[in-house]
Amino acid sequence: MTTAATGASSALDLPDYAPVPPSSLGPALNDQGYYVGRVERNLYWVTDGTYQSAFLTTRDGVVLFDAPPTIGHNLRRAVDEIAAAEGVTNSVTHLVYSHHHDDHAGASSLFDSDVVRIGHEETRQLLLRDNNATRPAPEVTFQDRYTLEVGGERVELAWHGPNHSPDNIFIHFPDHDALMLVDIVNPGWVPINNLNLSEDVPGYIQAPATALGYPWKHFIGGHLGRLGNRDDIQVHQQYIADIEASARQVLTTVDPTRYFVKYGPNVWAAVRTYFVELANRAAAPVIAKYTGVLAAADVEGPPPRS
Ligand SMILES: [Zn+2]
């Protein structure tokens, strides 16, 4: 492709969207492109503004939770920075996978081959299938629950059924008032691309209620630039409930007849145009309600007219 084909002028044709609410943004990144902060006590989180990882420093080593490739080598820098400041070992001894997806696990191979990788048994199966050297399969696996104890610290891992992916787990830090649940709720933002590309939509819709069933104050959602709180989960639940209610409402009000009359034997054309109309009508009131509340509320709807 030539430079001319991707010239800057084509950007002028791209649609405009509502500004990101300031409350959806997180702390500024440093010169190396990351931010590392304390969640509580010796639990820390790292972000590049789009992806999030977390780590626990202990007297026996550092436990890392996810290794997004966009943060990549900055994970090591963040761990080194905190370990030096706290006077503890910077040796990463354990790596917990939230789920098998490359965008949260693809920097796993940056850590020593003798790190202990932990994940759901389905994560192991999916990573063995994917056979990607950047994401070695976990050697330590569990089916429903696993208590990880390292250097006097405790983390509770649990699988509550499929949601975003078949293997996505809940990572509870009972002594740090925190929960890590990735690719379900994006604090301050709407989900991207059909509920964060979820494979099991009923499971995805149920997961925030399961999250609220745990005691915690700090939420690590795996995406965007800030941590979440319990209010963020409730706003997300209301947003999803509003989509569901709006969708049910348009199903009873949009008459499909004219699409089938227009396209005759081409039933796929009728179904497609009918579905687009349903989606646009269902989305409109939800976009209006959440624009200015959740970032990108207008992005998932029909492209705005310029
Ligand atoms: Zn994912």
Image (cartoon, rainbow, N blue to C red):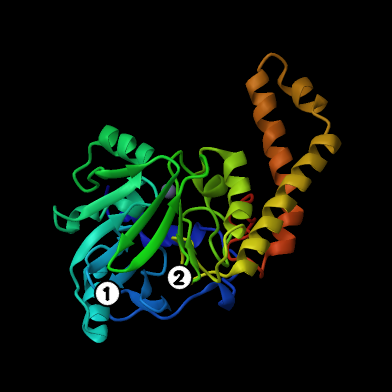
**Residue 225: percent from left, percent from top:** 45, 70
Q: Quadrant of residue 140?
A: top left
Which disc, if any, is residue 175? 2
Compared with 165, 226 (above or below) is: below
Q: Secondary structure at mark 2?
A: loop
Q: CA distance from mark 2 to mark 1?
A: 22 Å
**x 51%, y 39%: residue:** 162
What is the x, y in percent for residue 11?
45, 61
Q: Check mark 2 vs ligand 1: CB closer than 8 Å? yes or no.
A: no
Q: Is residue 27 above or below residue 75?
A: below
Q: Amino acid at mark 1?
A: Ala
Query: In the image, 86: left or right of 29?
Result: left
Q: Is residue 93 above or below residue 252?
A: below
Give me the residue at 22% from left, 45% from top: 136
How many residues crowd around disc 1 within 10 Å: few (fewer than 14), some, or many (20 or more)? many
Q: Residue furthest front?
A: 152
Could you tell whether 193 is left or right of 36 in the image? right
State the image quarter where residue 266 is shown. top right
Residue 94: image x %, image y %?
25, 58
| Residue at position x 69%, y 42% in the image | 279
Closer to the camera in the image, 127 or 305? 127
Residue that mark 1 sits on: 78
Is 227 positioned to the left or the right of 294 in the image? left
Residue farthest top in this picture: 265
Q: Split into 4 quadrants, where in the image is the C terminus?
A: bottom right
Residue at image x 63%, y 56%? 304
> Which numbered disc flags the more N-terminal residue, 2 or 1?
1
Residue 34 drawn at (x, y percent):
32, 74
In the image, farthest residue toward the right: 253
